[in-house]
């Protein structure tokens, strides 16, 4: 049977696995599902149609599954789905989706969300991400696997951040950041490739060299962007990491692409 503190409040219909732990003063709504090994430490609010994945730990004053902050939301039965083994720290907020945005906000596995982070409606967040204190996503953002977002950074709605990218703290991200990119500045500019992250994740040296070379051709080569992208594909496209960048750029449509520039540019 779940271990539930006497001060917690569970609405009828909530589904809890047998080994779930619910600490003092937690409030769990009627359409919430807590899978095996989930731990709510205390003062956690879970609302809406929300699924919390196995072994995820949620700290005090986090509020998950509340309605989207969207004027177009009309009370539709939208969802929040959080993957296994996440660590969700104090005062993190995550909203359900909207009918217009597909109806679901998704968070992958093994994410680490530090205090006061926010994941807005209809976001798709990958696995193994790290959001430092106060990192904020607007609605409909797509965040790839292994992304690091620095503290007090805000990401504009509909923006994409590619896998293995790293965003500095106190940054406004209003353009798509390529996979493996480093971005910083009051308004984000690319400053290079996340070589340290690639090395930590055991990418081959040849792949790291290919990505760095592709970066130079894509952003500092001759011709239009489409022509430079074709040149990158012709020279380095056989490398899977470079192929990720090529696919990412070609799939963009809602936001402009984040480019290199001086970090103090606005």
Image (cartoon, grey):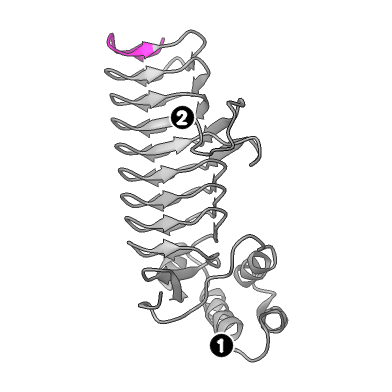
Specify whether residue 207 is in view: yes
Residue 101, x across and y down, in percent: 63, 42
Residue 60, x across and y down, in percent: 28, 30
Could you say whether the residue bearing mark 1 is in a helix, strand or loop?
helix
Q: Give the range drawn in magenta.
A: 1-9
Q: Quadrant of the C terminus?
A: bottom left
Residue 220 marker? 1
Q: Which residue is drawn at 49% across and 70% down?
A: 181
- Tell me whether circle 2 and circle 1 mark residues in contact (CB < 8 Å): no
111 or 65, nearer to the observer: 65
Specify whether residue 55 is in view: no
Decide: few, some or many residues near mark 2? Use Cα within 10 Å; few <14, some 14-19, many ≥20: many
| Alpha-carbon span between mark 2 and mark 1 | 44 Å
Is 107 above or below relative to 20?
Answer: below
Residue 211, x across and y down, in percent: 56, 76
Q: Is residue 147 left or right of residue 152?
A: right
Is 263 above or below relative to 31?
Answer: below
Q: Is residue 206 left or right of residue 185?
A: right
Precedes in sequence: disc 2 or disc 1: 2
- How many circles with numbers are drawn on the protein? 2
Residue 188, x across and y down, in percent: 43, 69
Is most of the magenta stretch helix, strand or loop? Answer: loop
162 or 78, nearer to the observer: 78
Q: Name the residue under label 2.
A: 66
**Magenta stretch: includes residue 5:** yes
């Amino acid at each position: 049977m779940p271990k539930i503190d006497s001060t917690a409040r569970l609405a009828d219909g909530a589904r809890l696995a047998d080994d779930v732990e619910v600490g003092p003063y937690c409030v769990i709504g009627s359409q919430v599902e807590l899978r095996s090994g989930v731990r709510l430490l205390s003062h956690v609010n879970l609302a809406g149609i929300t699924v919390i994945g196995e072994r995820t730990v949620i700290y005090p004053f986090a509020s998950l599954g509340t309605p989207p902050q969207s004027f177009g939301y009309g009370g539709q039965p939208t969802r929040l789905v959080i993957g296994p083994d996440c660590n969700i720290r104090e005062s993190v907020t995550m909203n359900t989706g909207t009918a217009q945005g597909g109806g679901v906000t998704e968070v992958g596995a093994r994410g680490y969300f530090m205090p006061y982070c926010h994941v807005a409606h209809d976001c798709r967040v990958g696995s193994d991400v790290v959001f430092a204190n106060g990192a904020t996503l607007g609605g409909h953002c797509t965040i790839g696997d292994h992304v690091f977002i620095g503290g007090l950074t805000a990401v504009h709605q509909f923006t994409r951040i590619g896998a293995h990218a790293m965003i500095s703290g106190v940054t406004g991200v209003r353009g798509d950041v390529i996979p493996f990119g480093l971005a910083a500045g009051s308004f984000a500019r690319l400053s290079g490739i996340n070589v340290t992250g690639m090395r930590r994740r055991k990418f081959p040296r040849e792949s790291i060299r290919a990505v760095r070379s592709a970066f130079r051709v894509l952003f500092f080569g001759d011709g239009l962007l489409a022509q430079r992208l074709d040149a990158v594909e012709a020279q380095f496209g056989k490398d899977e990491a470079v192929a990720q960048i090529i696919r990412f750029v070609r799939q963009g449509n809602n936001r402009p692409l984040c480019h290199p520039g001086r970090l103090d540019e606005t």
